[in-house]
Amino acid sequence: MSDEFLRSIQSEKLRQLYRFWVRQSPAAGGPPRARDLDVPALADWARNLIVIEVRPQARFRYGFYGTTFRKAFGVDMTGAIVEDLPAAQSGILTAEYRMVRRTQRPYWRVYAGWFGPKEEPQTWERLSLPLLGQKGDVAFILAAAYRADVGRALIGA
């Protein structure tokens, strides 16, 4: 586990998820296999989870879209293809997922924008974690995000 990477993460829930992912990883290191993941243990994060299926031709599909995101963004993306989102959003997410797939390493970022049905300014902290398939390639990406601006004054709001 990279202590430096872990220190970058501000959300305690995301730090806990990262530690869980590391514990699920094989003793030799590297990402855990999707089939070996303790899925019931993800219950604490379920509302804030997204599961991305890595499809043929490196396309990405939402296999699961947590309730926090459905409420915050006003849409359920389960079953949708990431590349079908508006170009700016699709570009950012596709680049992130390609990076996770290629490197087989976690990816962390903070992002802000005007989101949801009411177009409110929001800041989110996000962690994307690779899960390997049978062939040793990334078959799924487990992503979680938590609002980073809750309880803080929003500048320009």
Image (spheres, rainbow, N blue to C red):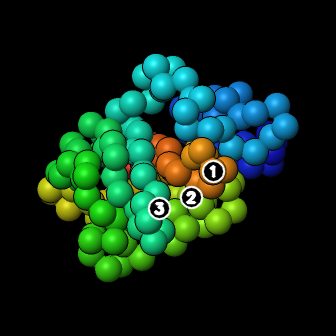
Q: Say the numbered circle drawn on residue 109.
A: 2
CA gap, disc 2 to disc 1?
Answer: 28 Å
Q: Residue shown at 76%/33% (left/top)?
A: 26
Q: Position of residue 46 (x, y in %)?
A: 39, 30
Q: Position of residue 3 (x, y in %)?
A: 81, 42
At label 3, the amino acid type is Tyr
Find numbered disc 1 in the image and state the secondary structure of the residue it sits on. Answer: loop
Q: Residue furthest top?
A: 40
- In which quadrant is the C terminus drawn? bottom left
Q: Residue shown at 52%/63% (left/top)?
A: 97
Q: Say the numbered circle drawn on residue 135.
A: 1
**In the shown orientation, is residue 78 left or right of residue 15?**
left
At label 1, the amino acid type is Lys
Q: Contact (CB < 8 A) between labels 2 and 1? A: no
137 w.r.t. 67: above or below: below
Dot 1 crowding, Cα within 10 Å, few <14, some 14–19, many 20+: few
**Residue under pointer 3:** 111
Mark positioned earlier in the residue sequence (1 or 3): 3
Q: Position of residue 142 (x, y in %)?
A: 50, 44
Q: Residue shown at 26%/48% (left/top)?
A: 78
59 w.r.t. 20: above or below: below
Query: Can you tell which quarter of the image residue 68 is in?
Result: top left
CA gap, disc 1 to disc 3?
Answer: 33 Å
Query: Can you tell which quarter of the image residue 35 is in?
Result: top right
Q: Residue shown at 20%/61% (left/top)?
A: 119
Does residue 152 appear anywhere in the picture? no
Find numbered disc 3 in the image and state the secondary structure of the residue it sits on. Answer: strand
Q: Contact (CB < 8 A) between labels 2 and 3? A: yes
Mark positioned earlier in the residue sequence (2 or 1): 2
